[in-house]
Amino acid sequence: MTLMDQVKKGLIPLEVEKAARKEGVDSTWLAEKLSEGRVVVPANPKHKGLEPCGIGEGLRVKVNANIGTSSDKADLNEELEKLRVSIEAGADTVMDLSTGGDIDACRRAIVKASSVAVGTVPIYQAVVEVAEQGRGIADLTVEKLFQVIERQAQDGVDFMTVHCGLTLGALEMLRAQGRITDIVSRGGAFLTHWMLHHGKENPLYKHFDRLLELARKYEVTLSLGDGLRPGCIADATDRAQIHELMTLGHLTKIAWEQGVQVMIEGPGHVPLDQIEANVLLQKKLCHCAPFYVLGPLVTDVAAGYDHVACAIGGALAAACGADFLCYVTPAEHLSLPTVEDVREGVVVTKIAAHAADIARGNKAALEQDKQMAIARKNLDWDSQIKLAIDPQKAREYREKSPPSEEDVCTMCGKFCAIKQVKDYFRGRG
């Protein structure tokens, strides 16, 4: 039985117990949320050493970090370092999006080394392997695609992005309305190429039952991808995007009937004034399944600072009900991120998630901020550093500019407002 099968029967699997303990919630409550499809606990039994976490309604907002090789750079050791740094910085999951080098070896090494859930986009590897044989995307067979999906599941992948809602009908909608950036999803572009060349329906949609069989067999959570996500704010919330979202809502119900856990992936690039509407649409059309958003980026002109644009949109999206934020690094749209880019992307997105947790009334998040306020009042610098989302950077700033007096910082020095008022009240006492 899958985890969803078990909780529907009133059982509480060990993975759910562990996730509840990690979250600080009641395991019975978490099991009920999972049975309703409002929470997922990605946990492939073949992923040894996994510390499961829950994603969805009533839980902390989670953060994902994308790592992986490219056709221009494939250094396994560097990707493993990115994994280490991601987890150290607070990522709740990672995705291996490798398209270069030995993809199988990279994925297996990442799964083996990762204590957090690992996701993939199987069509990437399927297309790469066809290309390595000197053939084109159109030569990809349905059998090849599903072979790769099963191979990755056998290796312990916990969740997979599959663009099942990208149908011929959705492409016709896109063609009729027009877009500035057309399709920016790499997986969506691969499938579009294949579909238009053959004049056939998306195999992930047409053979969704086969996909569910593999998901059941290996306990893989399906992250239903947004192949038509907007690639610029001018394309946001258009007919093609919503058409795909409606299809994903339909497929979600089918997956739940088969005991398969589902997340829904969302945009992309969305202006601030449309973010709340996008979240509400997803929750309504997809039956409150967990919502996984890439950003969303709130402007197209933040190159080099897209992680900031992402955090702005992510904080608002999560405050409105999104459950899972995929980080963006400073290198987005420009290059493969470095280890430091990865670290910065995770930290900035963790800040967005934490801000949303506060807005959602999460008790642990509120308590952390309260303790920080107390530490600041007490001029307790060690506690301030420990409570920071990025203690490493906080300590570096403190140490590189040592104050003349230990209980203040060099911004205000002896004129520190907190110290003055504290000394005044102590004198009056």
Image (cartoon, helix red, strand yellow):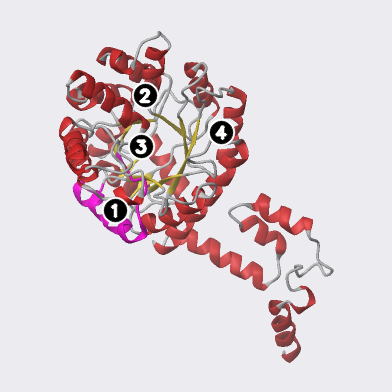
Is 385 drawn above or below residue 210 in the view shown?
A: below
Q: Which mark is residue 292?
A: none
Crowdedness of circle 3 by 10 Å Cα count: few (<14), some, many (20+)?
some
Q: Earlier in the sequence, mark 3 or mark 1?
A: 3
Q: Which mark is residue 122?
A: 2
Q: Does the magenta portion include 81?
A: no
**Measuring 39% from the left and 35% from the top, which residue is drawn there?**
14
Q: Is residue 213 visible?
A: no
> Residue 308, how many percent across, how many down?
50, 53
Q: CA distance from mark 3 to mark 1?
A: 20 Å
Residue marked by disc 1: 279
Q: CA distance from mark 3 to mark 2?
A: 17 Å
Residue marked by disc 4: 83
Crowdedness of circle 4 by 10 Å Cα count: few (<14), some, many (20+)?
many
Please say if the residues under marks 3 and 1 sit with CB atoms less than 8 Å apart. no
Q: Which mark is residue 184?
A: 3
Please say if the residues under marks 3 and 4 sit with CB atoms less than 8 Å apart. no
**Amino acid type, callout 1:** Val
**Amino acid type, callout 3:** Val
Is 148 drawn above or below residue 173 in the view shown?
A: above
> Residue 251, how many percent across, how many down?
19, 35
Q: Quadrant of the rendered structure where residue 36 is? A: top left
